[in-house]
Each structure stands twice: as structure tokens, then as C-alpha cells.
Image (spheres, coloured by chain):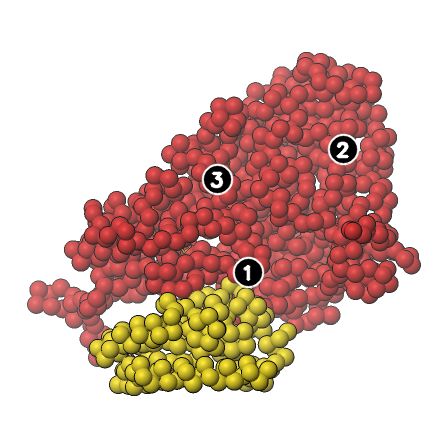
Amino acid sequence: MALKEKYNDRIQLHLSKYPDSRSAVMPLLYIAQEEYGYVNDQGVDEVAEILDLDPTQVRSIAGFYTMYSEKPKGKYWLQVCTDLACALNGADEFHKALKDYLGVEEGGTTEDGLFTVEHVMCLAACDKAPMLQCNFHFMEDLDMDKMKAWVEEKRAEYQAELDAK
Amino acid sequence: MAIPVKDDTKLVTVKIDDKEYQVPAGANLVDLAKWYADNDIPVFCYHPKLEPVGMCRMCLVELGSIMRDRETGDVVLDDNGEPTVRWFPKLQTACTQTASDGMVVRTNTEAVDETRENVLEFLLTSHPLDCPICDKGGECPLQNLTMEHGPQESRMIYSDKMHLQKHVPLGDLIFLDRERCIQCARCVRFQDELVGDAVLGFHERGRRLQIITSSDPGFDTYFSGNTTDICPVGALTTADFRFGARPWEMTEIPSISPWDAAGENISLSMRLDRDFGGRAMIKRVMPRQNEYVNELWISDKTRFGHHFTRSLDRLVEPMVSFGDKLTDQSWNDAYKAAVTALEGASGDVAAIAGGAISNEDLWELRQLVEGLGGSRLGAWPPTHGGADLVAEVGVGQDTNLKELGAGDAILVVASDLEEEVPIWRLRLKRAQDRGAYLVVANARPTRMEEFALDTQRNDKPVEGAAVRYAPGEAAAAISDLKSSNKDVYDRLADATNLVVVAGADGLDLDGNKALMQACANLLIETDHVGKANNGLMSPIPGPNGMGLHYLGYTPEVTQDIVANPPKVLIVAQAEPAEDDPTATEWLSKVDTVITLSLFPDRTTSYASIVLPIQSFAERDGTFVNGERRVQRFYTAQGPLGEAVPAWKILTTIREKLGQGRAKLSAAAVMLEITKNVDVFAEMRYKNLSQVTRQFPEIGGDDLYYGGTAYQNRGGLGIQIPSAADSGKVKAGKVASVKATKASKGELIALPITELYNRSNAFMPSGLVHARVAVPYVTLSSSDADDLGLVDGDLVEVSFEGGAVRVRATVGDVPAGVALLPQHLTDEPTPIVPTVVTLSKIAQPVLA
Ligand code: SF4
Ligand code: FES
Ligand code: FES
């Protein structure tokens, strides 16, 4: 069983935090998402098995929270906040410009598999708007110039990796 | 909690819409308003059999409490001398409130009316409003409540509605319409709380919230159909009934499930139908409330297994063989042949009757045999003894399994209840949820054992223990419990109430009888007999296993008939040659076999006279369930072909034999039984059809409360008192049991039960075929190694009287035995533990 072997220490750590093992379902789903890039059926089945839950229960949790992705994502998962405070600071325009620059629709992934863009509700960084979270790390006080530079940097890194192979 | 109140319930005063009521402390507000004040608080998510969750907000009411002075405890009066009420600033969900003294409720104010209207408008914002083509239309809580409380018009823009999938199969049996779902979670909670299989869940949130299953296989339980009854909209429908009829076209006929010892009360929804030549046919089978028996639930087998009543495979004409071949004959000629055969037997007449035949049939059959000078009346199958002990120390008068809980204990031994009597398993698991201690003893794993080993369920602790004994050693395991398993024994002995369910899983008749005696002794020694919610039950096959006992049919006599075949044998609604590989051998020794049968089968091919009988749906009669409750079923469907009720065939033959005038109705037969068999003295049809008020009160206009289970209009039945109810009983001696022995290279096959199987009566229900298991045999890994077998190998299992080819599976069973389910193969397999040999069949290699 992949997750259990590969991440045993982390899984055990999470299990030890709760009196009732099923409470560890969310941290374990993160591990599954990390491993498979998104919450796939295999990840759900494995988490269910570890926690002695029915796969349906695990899938329900993954479906409820937006931090879990149930579809394959790019290497960089960009979640742009477009909630009220950010919107007042131009988040909508920023979000649209980012999509246009990358050439993707809402929720879409670039052809090279590097970037996925979607909008989310308040991430509690309203004072640093516009902002987004990339693979759960905040990037704040953004504008398109900064963003373009970052995107190109990542593209170059990726190209270098390809060249090295 | 208890509604209606028990002697020791604490009462409190609650005021609803300015009237005061004395109600049990802690009772749910929705329940008590309905029961005591006849006030229907509308609900969607609340259901009286499920835990409240407060999800839908339909039940909002004004709630307050009478103020008391903190120091003196006196009621604070206002300027007019009236008690002051402290109101909650906002409306409260009634479904999450429980009665306490001084509670004040208003349900008839403007604020409440407006809220109800608003909640409905909200629920309808994205509802498809496809009532005209919806199966629930006409009996739909959402429809009814909208008519009563809803807005007349929607302010919603139609094109803004959420569109979701409309035909999602959640398994083979249930379809989901995601647009109609109002997210009440009743189906989810039914599965989680009652069944214990969390195979339904929600996915996403907000307007996209929808029901899913990610389990494999999907929505696969023996109780799935019940979710369609409690779903307050048409989101869940059964594959069997969907698009089949409108509710108002159907006539409801009260009946009893023909499958097992639970005796589930059902309602047959009948409609004249072109699929049945314009005659009334069963469109669906629905639960009928009997809080003592099945509450509001039925198993899927009961719900979906009705197709045999009009199967084209049924026998529809009498057949007689004058030489070597059975040919169709008129009833006149068939009767003539029967009379000639019976008269020629010079008294050497015996009968074997199955567990699905009614008391009326059994009585006429017994009169016939005894009138001819015979005395041997056998019960089929000869595997379950101990009905006499159930009669003696069976569960006491007024037993209701739903009352078992904390402080009580349950012992299930040698039975796979999930497969044998699903409703008992549902109710006993629920008792464990409420705190009862569940002990499961068997030689092999079962679903019930998993429950016994659970330590917590839905965040609440549950208790139990599993006892594994060596195959065949069930009786010893129970007799020795005190020394071998003191902790478990003490818990059982000290329990306030103790119910024991003992079966014949993996046992032969002697083994089962010894076990029943050991269980009876345990109950007597620990003083758990002769009172409600205490005593013995047994999953004797068929809906009338106890009726066989009370009317004088025993498995021991069957064994005697097998050993010493009579001249004429009447086989009544039993299929020995279908069940038992050794039957053909003894059947062929009988001069004349007369069968009363539903289907042509292996048994009828040994008969020279075959008389077609009517199924439970075509006639009326009574069954005695495993809790000794005598229950009536009513005529729903017209006869198939020339089939006649068994009692009528028998009473006609009796008349022709000069045994008196033929009776004209099943009621008349029952009247005669009441006069001749003491325990039936009270069981006249009129008495059996009495109904008293039941909690929860369901099935009126307020379908939203309990769902579409039907109100009981056919009678709650009457329980026959056990001997212990009426006097003292003594423990008996547990006979020692001879174990079946196998030599080297052989295994002992233990017959087990699969709820869904290939029996003649179940096969016509095609919808369920996909869920009948591929024939298999389960053996231990050590035996599999010895035999060179791996999981999935095709093997031939040979035994006395035959052989079958099945798939080998390796499982958690003791070495030396193999589990061989009955009725999965076309050919019969052993009905008692039997020595078998297994050999691997080389499979053709696919190119
Ligand atoms: S399918 Fe029916 S029972 Fe289940 S949540 Fe939806 S409305 Fe409720
Ligand atoms: S509104 Fe964007 S982070 Fe709060
Ligand atoms: S919130 Fe009370 S019935 Fe749904």
C-alpha cells in the first residue's frame, strides 16, 4: 500500500494526535493529494482503509472542502482570492489577466501541465490584496508584472529540468 | 423518551399553542406535539427513527420557558398575574428540542407561518418541479407541505436553477435524481445509524451538494429500499417500481412477508395492469407499520422478491401420472386420483410440510392424515429443532426488540442473521447501538460478529464480544460459557434483559437441538424467561416455522419418514429434492408422492399427483413468526391459472374421503383451529386484525413524518404466550452430540445461508439476479494449500447424492471444514454438515 509505506511516519504522527483515528482524515487526505497530485480514488480507498472508514465517508470530506482537489492539477495550483476585500483591490482584474496571460479558463491547466488557475473565497490575507495561494503557500501584494516574472522563472526552471534529462 | 409513557416515566408540563399537556420528560418536541396535541409540525430532515440533526429548518417554532425566580424557585408572574415567559429571540428548530418542565411552544403565529413559507421557497429555488412525471407525486412530503405552507408563486428565475444528473444508479436497485434531492440526509443517516454501512454520503456543498456513493459495490445493502420510503421527495426510487404506477391508482392489501421468521408486515400495492392481462398485480411491496415486528422497515428481499407470485414458471394445472409421465388433468380427475391413492394406503399416510405454508393449510393437512389413520407429520427442512423450546421459553409477552438497550444483553449463536432474518439483524444491531451488550458465537465469521467486535459506532461506544467454537461444538460452547468465558457469561447473566437467538448454522438437527436446550437452560438459570424482552428466538426457515410446531409438525418425524418411507407421502409446499441431495433416494422409495406445489421442481418429478397451490398473494391465511406472533395476510391477487389454496385442496379431498363437509373459507378453518388447539384459542381472524395506536403515528396525510410506510390496517397480530409466561419451566438435559468425522483428504461441508439465492421462489425476481453470488465454497488457507487450490479456482465438491462445481475462496474458516452455501447451484447441496471431497477442475485456457 503506497501511502502507508511511503508516508508511514507522518501518518503515525497524525494518528497519534487524535483520540479517535477517524479524526485524522483531513491530514491524511492532504498526504494523498500530495502524493497523487489530487484526491483520486486510490487515495480515497487508501485513507479509508487506514482509518477504517467507508470510502464514501472519505470522499464526502474531500468533496466538501475546497482545499482538496478532485481533479488533476498543474504543478503549481494558483488559487486567487476574489472575495470582497480583494475584489475592492482589483483582484477580479488580476484574476482575469492571469488567466489570459496563461491562456486558460477558470479551473483550467496550461498545456505544459505547469499552472492551474482558479478563484477562491477569502484566504484571510485581505490586507495584502491581490493575493493568491500557490500549493497552499501565500503570494501577496501581487500585480501582473510580479506575476509574469514569477511564471517565466518557473517555466525556465522547468525547461532546464527537461534539458537536463 | 418513551412515548407512549411507561409507568415509571417522569412527566413534565409543556404548553403548546396555549394548551397544557403532560408529556414524558425528554420526549422530542416534534413527536410529542403530534402524539399529544395532534399538532403536525412540518419536518423534512427529522424522522422519528433517526437522530435529529436540525438541517432543513422546516420545523422552526417559537419557543420559550416559564420564568422562575432564581432564589425561591417560584414562577415569576407578570402584571396580570400570568406566568412570565422568556422567549428565545429567534425561532428554534422543534426537532432538536426535548420536553422540559415549563416549556412553551407556539406553532400558529405569523412568524412561524412566514418562516415555513420562506423555507419552502428556499427549498424550491432549485427544485425541478417535475411532479407530473415523478414517482413520488401524490405521496410526496415536499408536494404536500408546499400545498399547505408554501408560497403560491416562486420569485426564482427558472433558468437559474441548478441542473444535475437525473438518473444515477446508486447500485442495482436504487436510482437517484440529484435535482430533486433536498439534502435532508435521511438516506445517509438511515445507512449510518440503522444499517451500519456508511455507503451514502454528501459531496460538495451549497447548491451543488449531492448524494454520492464511493463504495464498492455501491449502494449494496439488504435494506436499501427503505431509503426510498423515507426520502421526502422523489430523489430515490427503486428500479423495481420507478415509472410503474401512480400512488393513487393502487389499492393497498395488508400482507406478511413470505420469506423468513421475522414476519415483516407489508402492504401489497395492487393495480389492474396490462402486464398481467388486465388483472390486479403487485406493483410494489411496501412496509406496513408494526412496531413489535418490523417497525417501518422491510428487507430488500421482501420488497423486491415478489415476482414469483405471477411467474410463468409456476404450476397452473393439476398433473397426474398414470404410467410414467405427469400430464395435465382436470381438478376432478386429480382429486379422483388423490382419493384413490389415499384410500389405497390403508392408513400408511404421512406428510411433510415446509415453513412457508399457512396454519390453515397445516390444520387441514393434519386432519386429512389423521382421518386416514396416519400420524406422521414432518417439518421441512429437518435442520431446525427446538421450536418446542421457543414455545416454552421464547421471548415473553409484549417483547419488543426496540426496547432493548443499556443494561440488556443479546446472544446470537449459530446464526448468520444478516442472511437469515435481516430485520432481526437490523433491530438487534440497533439495540447494541442503544447500549445492549452483543455476544455472537459461531464457528465462522459473520456480519453480526463484526458488530459484536465494534467498540464504537457513530462516535458512541458500543459493547460486545465474539466467541468462536470448534465446528459442531455450539451446544458445548454455551453450556460451558460460565467456565470458559466467565466475563461474557457474567455480562449475560447480570443483564436486565437477555434475548438469545439460536440457529442451526453449521449444525445438524441433533447439534441444533442440543444448542437450543443449552440456550434455554442459560435463560432459565439466569432468570431471563417469562417476561417481556427476555427469552429465546430461532431463525427457523420460512415465515411459519413456529406454526409447524404448534400444529404438530416436527423435524424428528421427518427424519423418521426419511428412514421409513410411507406408502403415500403428501409433500406440502416443500421442495426436499431441490434442497437436499439425498432426498431423491428416499423419495423414490415412497409408493405415491402427492405434492402441493408452487413450482414444478425435482420433487414434483417424483410425484404421481401434483396439485398447484396459490401463493401468499392470491389467498388469505395466517403465519406464526419467530416471536410467536400470529399474523394475518389477505388476498391481494387473483389466482394464477387453476391454482387453489392448499387448505381448500385438502378440505375438498377430505370431503371426498367422507371426512365431513368441505370448509368454505380460511376463516372457517381458523375457527376450527381455535376450538381445537389451545394456544390458538384467541386467534380468530377478527381478533388478529385488531390495531391499537402505535408510536410513531405514521401514514396519515403527514407523510413527511414517517415516510411512505403504510399505517397498519390489517392487524398487529397476537402473540402466543410462552409456557414460561404462564408458569414455571425447568432446565433440561443437553444431549451430547456426535460430531461428523472426516478422514484424510476429506473436508466437512457446513451448509450456510445466502439471503439472495437461486431458489425457485426467488429466481423470478430478475432485478436481484445480479446480486446472487456466484456459487462458491470457502475453505481455510491450510486446506487450500493441501489441496493445491488458490482463490478463484474452479472445484468439484462431491458428497453423498451428488456433486457441484463451484469457485473456491480462501477465508477465515477453521481447518477441516468448508462453507458451502445452499441454493446457489442448480443442483442441491447438503443441508447438514456432510463429508465432502474437493477436486480442482482444470480450466480451458483461453487462446
Ligand atoms: S436523496 Fe432523499 S433522503 Fe437522501 S438527502 Fe436527498 S432528499 Fe434526503
Ligand atoms: S478577501 Fe481576499 S483574502 Fe480576504
Ligand atoms: S431542522 Fe427540524 S426537521 Fe429539519
Q: Is residue B521 visible?
A: no
B521 lies left or right of B3: right
Q: Foreground residue, B138 or A59?
A: A59
> Which corner quadrant holds the N terminus of chain B?
bottom left
Residue at the image point whose x is 43% and y is 75% from the top: A115
Supply the letter of whichever chain is yellow.
Answer: A
Neighbour tally class for label 1: few under 14, some 14-19, many 20 plus, Cα within 10 Å: many
Q: Earlier in the sequence, mark 1 or mark 2?
A: 1
Residue B236: give x, y in percent of width and height.
44, 49
Type of amino acid under label 3: Phe
Mark linked to residue B241: 3
Q: Amino acid at mark 2?
A: Arg
Query: Which quadrant of the structure image shows residue B738?
Result: bottom right
Chain hosting mark 3: B
Residue at the image position 55 percent from the left and 56 percent from the top:
B218
Of the numbered discs in the image, which one, if any, rests on residue B602?
Answer: 2
Disc nearest the viewer among 1 and 2: 1
B319 is higher (above) or lower (below) than B504: above
Q: Secondary structure at mark 2?
A: loop
Q: Chain of mark 1?
A: B
Q: Position of residue A101 (x, y in %)?
A: 35, 74
Cα–Cα span, label 3 and label 2: 33 Å
Q: Which residue is mark 1?
A: B215
Disc 1/disc 2 C-alpha distance (Å): 40 Å
Q: Colour of chain B?
A: red
